[in-house]
Every structure is written in structure tokens, then in C-alpha cells.
């Protein structure tokens, strides 16, 4: 095989931008990985010959389809659905389904690309994929959500399977939506198989799944601190979001002796100088999961707490955990956190920090854990759910908790192995290189496919 000329990073990214016009989120995700991988690949001719990075930056397939459904007023509604199957070199495609008005092909391609490296870091045999629709479940009745999910799965079922592609939940897709989709899949194929994760415990789900992403982000944070001789205990934390990931991150920080000062939603954030207790966190879970309320109601319920519009990054704290959505923490906000003395940042969401914000943390030598490493706990437990389904067993909460702790410690170790230099760990570089190497080496083994 002839050696392909090694183009520089700028030329490579120009090609990515040309092939994906207007897909800013996807281009950002590729840029963030490529800038670290290029240095690692410099003297590895086998990766250049096989055009590995060029191939990884092109999804195996992008499936787009129409989703028709009927609302409670008998109006016919039409949404668009997608499944992006990015790379299955190390296992079946694995990644969530997102229902939100902001869902586009670009967003799902970025998420599937990130998922490929995140899944690689877990050490489990899972490839990368992502799917969703520009459907907003907020304000919809259970019957409307059911009809949409059934219509969505009626198209999606032909592209997934326990050894092909195993979706999970994501923003807008919780236990209710997974249940409706799994029921429709089972109805169509007339088989019970572990084709979705995040299922209810009654029908093949795994213990620890609701807690896994938030707990995992805190376990990774603790590993970073311990690597520098510190711990979570006695530190204050600002957290964005108030959904599953954010509330469980707050719960684990509190259990480990830290003080959580903020949570947020799209309307703004609450600041509680006294810190969130378990009782307060349980109240928020009920507010969000049962009442479907807004975080501003917290300030009316608990004395001393205040509600503010905007995002919580101006509140002074030792630790920061962005757990809401992509690009929610920009360069100016990152610099504010640095100026306020933040010691460590652990991402519970996918790519919540802009590229300029990431550089601000790196320049200040702040311990910064990217989502592909820090929030891999969720997909790790999803992978363990796949194993349980295959074996027709159910592991208990304690065993899964120990496995999650070990998995996050292992991911941290890989980041240190590839990212530590002169006593400082560049967790972005470490995660990117460790995740890439496993996928790339598997692709080399398969030849040109």
C-alpha cells in the first residue's frame, strides 16, 4: 500500500468543513479530537496509510426518516428522525436517542463521534452511535408520547438489534419513552432481546443506570483530585442542569462531603449558599420528574436560596460540573471560574464547554475532564445492562456500584497514561488518544472496509 501524503491539521479540518457544510457542532467535535490526535499520529505511518482519522470522521451511515403521528386533537404531526451509526470497529453501535427541538443531523453526528471514543475508553465492546428526533415531549400527554415513540420505532427497528445497534435514552428520552419504544420493537419483531438499554427493572433494565452518569462524573472528579492529593470533602461545587445527571451528581458530591451550591434549567439557576441536602435534592427530583416544574420554584420553597436568570458559572466554587447540554460554558465563563479559584471541572454533559472555554481551562492548568471521559459512567452501565440481558441475569446495586467505580478509575488511569507530562495531566489529550488508539488499531486489523 502506498503511503498517503500526510496533510496538516488545517488542511484536514478544511476538508471536514467542506464535506459537512453548516454542521458546526460536528466540525467542533472533530477539531477537538484531531488537534490532539495529529501529534500522536505524527510518526505512525500505518494510521496515515490507512487514512484512519479521515475514516473515523465519516460516519458509517446516517439514516434519516419521517415520523408521522396523531396528537390528542386528531391533528397529523410530522417530525424528522435520525440514527447516526458512526463506527462499529470494537462492538455494536451504542448511544442514546434524544428527543428535543434542537436535534439536527449535525448535533447527532457530533454526539455519535464523541460516543465512539467514550465507549472505547470504557474498555467494553461497544461502537459509537446516536439518534433522535426534533420532537419535544414537554407538554405532551402520555398518549401523544406513546404514539410518537411507536411511530419512531416502526421505522428505526429495521436498523437496530442486540448485535447491531443498541440505543439508550438521552435528553427527552427517559424510562417512559424507552418503555414505549421497547414495547413497539418487541411487538414488531416478536422477540424479546436486549435492543435498548435504560429499560425498567421489571423488563430487563439494570440497577444503577439512573445514577450512573452523574455518579460517574463525580467518581472521575474524585480520581482527579486524589491524583493531586485532594478529595471532594470540604469543597464547594457549582452544577448546571437539574435532570437525571445533575441531580445524581449533586447527590454523590453531597454524600462525599462536598457542598453543592447551584442547579439550573433553561430558565435560569438557583443559588443555595447553605448547600443542597439529600432532602432538597429529592425535592428537586420530584419537581422535575413528577410535577414537571421549573427550578425557580426551589427558591420559593427553601429559605435563603435565590433564583437568577442565566447560567451558574459566576458563582464562586472549588469544583464545576456542567451537566446540562452542549456549549453551555463559554470562554468568558471559563475565565470567570478560573478567576474565582476553580480547582477542577468534570463534564456530566456532552461537549458542554466550547473549544475556547476548554483552552481557557487548559491554559490555567485547571484539572479539566472532558465529557467523553467523565460522563462515560452512563454508557458503561448501559454496556453492563447488555451483558446482563445476554446472560439473562440481573446484578445487584452493590455489585454494579463497585463495577462503575472500577470503570471510572480505569478511564482515569488511561487519561493519565496518555496525557501526563511534567506533573500535569491534560485529560483532553489523554482521553482523545486512549479512545482513538483502540478504535484505530481495530480498524487496521480489518483492512479497508
Image (cartoon, rainbow, N blue to C red):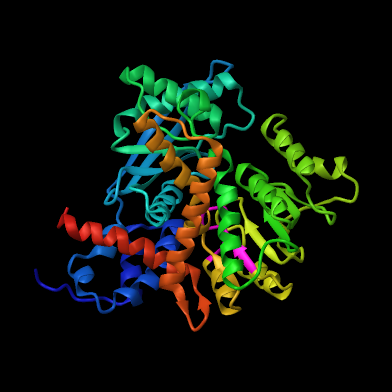
Front residue of this view, candidates 107 and 33: 33
Closer to the camera, 347 or 101?
A: 347
Residue 146 higher or lower than 321, as above or below: above
Residue under the point 53% across and 19% down:
75
| Residue 416 is a magenta residue | no
Q: Quadrant of the N terminus?
A: bottom left
User: Residue farthest to the left?
Assistant: 1
* The furthest residue to the bottom: 422
Q: Position of residue 189 (x, y in %)?
A: 31, 20
Q: Residue at x 43, y 47 (%)?
A: 108
Q: Residue at x 57, y 39 (%)?
A: 210
Q: Find the residue positioned furthest to the right.
A: 303
Residue 26 spot, x, y in % from top left? 42, 57
Give the magenta range.
344-354
Q: Quadrant of residue 261?
A: bottom right
Q: Nearer the viewer, residue 121 or 222?
A: 222
| Main secondary-structure element of the magenta-colored stretch | loop
Task: Say if 344 sits above or below 278 in the image.
Answer: below
Q: Is residue 172 visible?
A: no
Residue 445 x, y percent position in the rendering: 18, 58
The answer to whether residue 439 shows anywhere in this view is: yes
315 up-or-down from 243: above or below: below
Residue 359, image x, y percentages:
54, 73
Describe residue 364's horizontal placement relative to residue 441 as left or right: right
Residue drawn at x 59%, y 42% is 211
Residue 100 picture quarter: top right
Amino acid at each position: 500500500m502506498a503511503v498517503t501524503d500526510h496533510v496538516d491539521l488545517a488542511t484536514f479540518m478544511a476538508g471536514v468543513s467542506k464535506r459537512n457544510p453548516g454542521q458546526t457542532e460536528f466540525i467542533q467535535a472533530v477539531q477537538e479530537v484531531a488537534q490532539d490526535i495529529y501529534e500522536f499520529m505524527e510518526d505512525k505511518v500505518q494510521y496515515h496509510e490507512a487514512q484512519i482519522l479521515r475514516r473515523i470522521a465519516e460516519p458509517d451511515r446516517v439514516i434519516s426518516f419521517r415520523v408521522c403521528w396523531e396528537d390528542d386533537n386528531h391533528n397529523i404531526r410530522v417530525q424528522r428522525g435520525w440514527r447516526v451509526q458512526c463506527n462499529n470497529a470494537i462492538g455494536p453501535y451504542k448511544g442514546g436517542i434524544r428527543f428535543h427541538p434542537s436535534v439536527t443531523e449535525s448535533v447527532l453526528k457530533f454526539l455519535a463521534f464523541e460516543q465512539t471514543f467514550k465507549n472505547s475508553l470504557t474498555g467494553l465492546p461497544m461502537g459509537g452511535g446516536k439518534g433522535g428526533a426534533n420532537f419535544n415531549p414537554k407538554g405532551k400527554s402520555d398518549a401523544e408520547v406513546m404514539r410518537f415513540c411507536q411511530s419512531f420505532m416502526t421505522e428505526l427497528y429495521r436498523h437496530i438489534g442486540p448485535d447491531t445497534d443498541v440505543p439508550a435514552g438521552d435528553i427527552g428520552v427517559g424510562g417512559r419513552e424507552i418503555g414505549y419504544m421497547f414495547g413497539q420493537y418487541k411487538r414488531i419483531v416478536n422477540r424479546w432481546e436486549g435492543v435498548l438499554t435504560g429499560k425498567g427493572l421489571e423488563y430487563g433494565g439494570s440497577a444503577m443506570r439512573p445514577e450512573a452518569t452523574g455518579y460517574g462524573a463525580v467518581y472521575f472528579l474524585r480520581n482527579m483530585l486524589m491524583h493531586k492529593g485532594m478529595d471532594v470533602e470540604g469543597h464547594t461545587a457549582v452544577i448546571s442542569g437539574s435532570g437525571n445527571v445533575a441531580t445524581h451528581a449533586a447527590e454523590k458530591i453531597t454524600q462525599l462531603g462536598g457542598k453543592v451550591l447551584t442547579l439550573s434549567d433553561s430558565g435560569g439557576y438557583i443559588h443555595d449558599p447553605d448547600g443542597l441536602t439529600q432532602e432538597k435534592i429529592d425535592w428537586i427530583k420530584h419537581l422535575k420528574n413528577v410535577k414537571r416544574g421549573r427550578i425557580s420554584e426551589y427558591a420559593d420553597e427553601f429559605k435563603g436560596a435565590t433564583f437568577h436568570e442565566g447560567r451558574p458559572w459566576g458563582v464562586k466554587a472549588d469544583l464545576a460540573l456542567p451537566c446540562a447540554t452542549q456549549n453551555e460554558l463559554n470562554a468568558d465563563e471559563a475565565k470567570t471560574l478560573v478567576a474565582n479559584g476553580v480547582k477542577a471541572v468534570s463534564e456530566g454533559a456532552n461537549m458542554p464547554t466550547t473549544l475556547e472555554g476548554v483552552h481557557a481551562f487548559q491554559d490555567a492548568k485547571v484539572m479539566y475532564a472532558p465529557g467523553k471521559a467523565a460522563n462515560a459512567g452512563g454508557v458503561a452501565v448501559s454496556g453492563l445492562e447488555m451483558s446482563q440481558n445476554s446472560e439473562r441475569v440481573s446484578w445487584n446495586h452493590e455489585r454494579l456500584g463497585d463495577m462503575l467505580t472500577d470503570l471510572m478509575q480505569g478511564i482515569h488511569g488511561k487519561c493519565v497514561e496518555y496525557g501526563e507530562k511534567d506533573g500535569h495531566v491534560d485529560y483532553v489529550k489523554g482521553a482523545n488518544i486512549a479512545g482513538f488508539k483502540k478504535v484505530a488499531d481495530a480498524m487496521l486489523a480489518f483492512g479497508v472496509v
